[in-house]
Image (cartoon, rainbow, N blue to C red):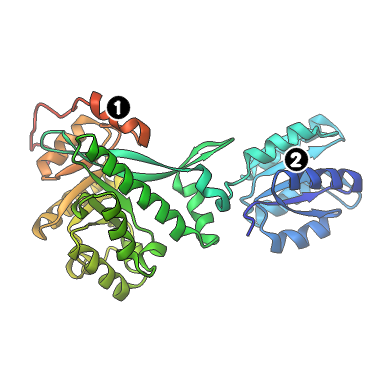
């Protein structure tokens, strides 16, 4: 399945052919229209990820079509082209932007192949079919709130895109889900994280590694056997691995999830309930399922400094976890003052920019050798 879909409107057959050929060379699935009516028919069913729109043709104009695209809540980037007048082209660009459309550029005809190809490359989504070549794993440290020493890292998938740089999961996870590759992608990250954690141990660092478990991974056959095999292969104790599961994932198939998580926990693998309070907010998850850690979402934590409601939520979640005997991790800690407040609440581990940003695997050992804890010198309970 091709995720990048290019829709072109131009009433000049030669220009249309040229634009379509450049689009195909840039690895787009291309649909071409010679009239507004044809364009609208294709648009309704094609769901383009990029639109190239000529402004001038015999039975309509591009500004009229921009109005239609606004009314249809179009979210695709739009490239405007015209050979009529550069000032009219700029007017159309401003009209489109003012109406909330994503106008990425406006090119005067004749369009140069290099300029068009560069724009197409810049707005092409990563192709998940080739993910093994460009997918990598970054790591963000987790530290003890009490004394600031590093206890482990969270593994975070990153896509190294040739034109758009480092992409976070929100840019490629939807494509992986659409193409049925989430299990393979998660498999890759999990295997890499276990191998890297073993290499840290070999270098003298007894650290944990946390990996997000997707719904596709959680429901796959022989998940436990695969994880145990990886742990055994790299001689990593099961207690060094934490699997993070969100509320949403856990609730998709509760009976299957319960059995799978129970087997994982019996092997000594740690289980963290991630983003609690942002999804179903089902307290039964904490009662019925064998989680031994609660991770407080960074949205609440980061806002706690300035937002009273966020402080109440964090305080409540911390107290709930303590009453249920769960370890606590707060993510999104960006300053020392917030660190102090979380310590006073009894939070055990934190991660965030106050310690370090996510880093490539090859930087971890060097960072550990230079790390000096920014642990607060004064711990108070005034903010609690």
Residue 15: x, y in percent?
87, 43
Give the quadrant of the C terminus: top left
The kind of secondary structure element at disc 2 is strand
Residue pictured at 85% horizontal, 32% vertical: 85
Tell me where residue 344 sits by quadrant: top left
Mark in front: 2 vs 1: 1
In the rendered structure, are the residues bearing label 2 and label 1 in contact, judged by CB atoms less than 8 Å apart? no
| Foreground of the two, 338 or 236 | 236
Residue 4 against residue 95 in the figure, above or below: below
Query: Which numbered dot is residue 366?
Result: 1
| Foreground of the two, 249 or 85 | 249
- Give me the C-alpha separation between circle 2 and circle 1: 48 Å
The kind of secondary structure element at disc 1 is helix
Residue pictured at 26% horizontal, 38% vertical: 200
> Considering only order in the chain, which callout, 1 or 2, is on the residue closer to the N terminus?
2
Residue 331 against residue 260 in the figure, above or below: above
Give the quadrant of the N terminus: bottom right
Q: Can residue 360 be seen in this view?
A: no
| Foreground of the two, 11 or 68 | 11
Residue pictured at 10% horizontal, 45% vertical: 346
Q: Is residue 135 left or right of residue 324?
A: right
Q: In this view, does 35 lie to the left or right of 297?
A: right
Q: Is residue 49 visible?
A: yes
Q: In this view, does 294 lie to the left or right of 366?
A: left
Q: Mark 2 points at which residue?
A: 80
Residue 194: x, y in percent?
31, 48
Residue 286 against residue 344 in the figure, above or below: below
Tell me where residue 301 sits by quadrant: top left
Quick one: label 2, few (<14), some, or many (20+) residues within 10 Å?
A: many
């Amino acid at each position: 399945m091709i995720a990048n879909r290019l829709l072109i409107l131009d009433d000049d057959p030669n220009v249309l052919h040229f634009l379509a050929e450049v689009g195909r060379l840039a690895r787009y699935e291309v649909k071409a229209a010679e009239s507004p009516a044809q364009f609208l028919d294709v648009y309704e069913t094609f769901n383009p990820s990029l639109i190239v729109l000529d402004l001038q043709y015999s039975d309509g104009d591009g500004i009229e079509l921009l109005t239609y695209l606004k009314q249809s809540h179009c979210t695709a980037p739009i490239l405007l082209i015209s050979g009529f007048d550069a000032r009219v082209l700029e007017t159309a660009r401003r009209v489109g932007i003012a109406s909330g459309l994503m106008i990425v550029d406006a090119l005067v005809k004749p369009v140069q192949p290099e300029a068009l190809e560069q724009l197409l490359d810049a707005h092409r989504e990563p192709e998940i079919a080739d993910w093994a070549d460009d997918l990598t794993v970054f790591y963000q440290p987790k530290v003890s709130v009490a004394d600031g020493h590093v206890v482990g890292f969270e593994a975070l998938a990153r896509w190294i895109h040739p034109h758009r740089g480092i992409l976070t999961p929100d840019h490629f996870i939807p494509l992986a889900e659409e193409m049925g590759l989430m299990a393979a992608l998660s498999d890759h990250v999990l295997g890499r994280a276990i191998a890297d954690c073993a290499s840290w141990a070999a270098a003298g660092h007894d650290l944990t590694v946390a990996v997000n478990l997707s719904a596709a991974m959680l429901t796959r056959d022989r998940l436990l056997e695969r994880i145990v095999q990886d742990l055994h292969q790299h001689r990593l104790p099961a207690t060094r691995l934490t699997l993070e599961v969100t509320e949403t994932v856990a609730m998709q198939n509760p009976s299957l999830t319960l059995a799978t998580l129970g087997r994982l926990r019996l092997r000594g693998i740690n289980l963290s309930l991630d983003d609690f309070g942002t999804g179903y907010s089902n307290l039964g998850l904490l009662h019925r399922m064998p989680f031994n850690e609660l991770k407080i979402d960074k949205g609440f934590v980061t806002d706690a400094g300035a937002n009273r409601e966020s402080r109440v939520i964090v305080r409540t979640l911390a107290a709930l976890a303590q009453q249920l005997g769960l370890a606590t991790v707060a993510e999104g800690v960006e300053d020392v003052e917030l660190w102090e407040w979380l310590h006073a609440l009894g939070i055990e581990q934190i991660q965030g920019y106050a310690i370090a940003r996510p880093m490539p695997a090859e930087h971890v050992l060097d960072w550990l050798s230079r790390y000096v804890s920014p642990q607060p010198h004064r711990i108070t309970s005034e903010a609690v």
